[in-house]
Amino acid sequence: MTSRTFAQIIGVLFLAVGVMGFIPLLVSTPHPNAVPGLSADDGYGLLFGLFPVNWIHNLVHLGVGIAGLSAASSVSKANGFARGLAWLYGILTVMGTIPLLSMTFGLVPLHGWDVWLHGGTAAFAAYFGYGKRAQAAEIAESYHRAA
């Protein structure tokens, strides 16, 4: 799989997850006292009963999905997208493990299964953004552009 394919797949998946987060049937409502410290609690719940989301979290997923689909147009954009995604989701993974930051300053829930999902996303994105194959494809694309 290439970084362009990765960007396309991430784009479609994140758009789908972003939309699903707004569908009440797919988001279970947790116990009212389950998550203290979340000030943006509109739409808060557990997507598929596992992943904490709220309306801001869903908008972030939609934004990442749109960015992924638009980045898939070239190897260099796809590599840049994958690298940025690796850093962003790596930081979110670390934030999710720190109690004071796991609510992103009261705006977005980043705890529970989300930490594992963000960590996996960061690892895959780093592979596709920084791997030797990504670098070789970027060199080949720049060579073809110059020719």
Image (spheres, helix red, strand yellow):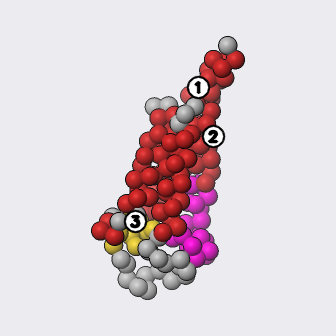
Q: Is residue 108 magenta?
A: yes
The magenta segment is: 89-109
Identify the residue under disc 3.
22
Disc 1 secondary structure class: helix
Does residue 26 sit above or below 89 in this rendering? below
Left or right side of 47 for 5 = right
Find numbered disc 3 in the image and state the secondary structure of the residue it sits on. Answer: loop
Residue 4 horizontal/vertical position (percent): 51, 34
Q: Position of residue 38 (x, y in %)?
A: 53, 79
How far, Cα to Cα, is label 3 from label 1?
A: 37 Å
Q: Which mark is residue 80?
A: 2
Residue at the limit of the structure toward the top, as seen here: 147
Residue type highlighted by circle 2: Gly
Residue kind at label 1, given as amino acid type? Ala
Q: Residues within 10 Å of mark 2 (few under 14, many from 20)?
A: some
Nearest to viewer (mark 3 / mark 2): 3
Q: Can you name the residue that lies furthest to the left here?
A: 25
Does label 3 or label 1 sit earlier along the sequence? 3
Residue contact between numbered discs 2 and 1, judged by CB atoms under 8 Å: no
Indicate yes or no whether the magenta region holds residue 98.
yes
Amino acid under label 3?
Phe
Which residue ends up furthest to the right in the rendered image?
146
The correct choice, above or below, for 9 with respect to 58 in the image is above
Task: Give how far across and how far down residue 19 sits, in percent.
Answer: 40, 59
Residue at 32 percent across and 66 percent down: it is 26
Kindly check if marks 3 and 1 are in contact, taking CB atoms under 8 A apart as contact. Answer: no
Cα distance in 3D space between marks 2 and 1: 12 Å
Q: Which residue is mark 1?
A: 137
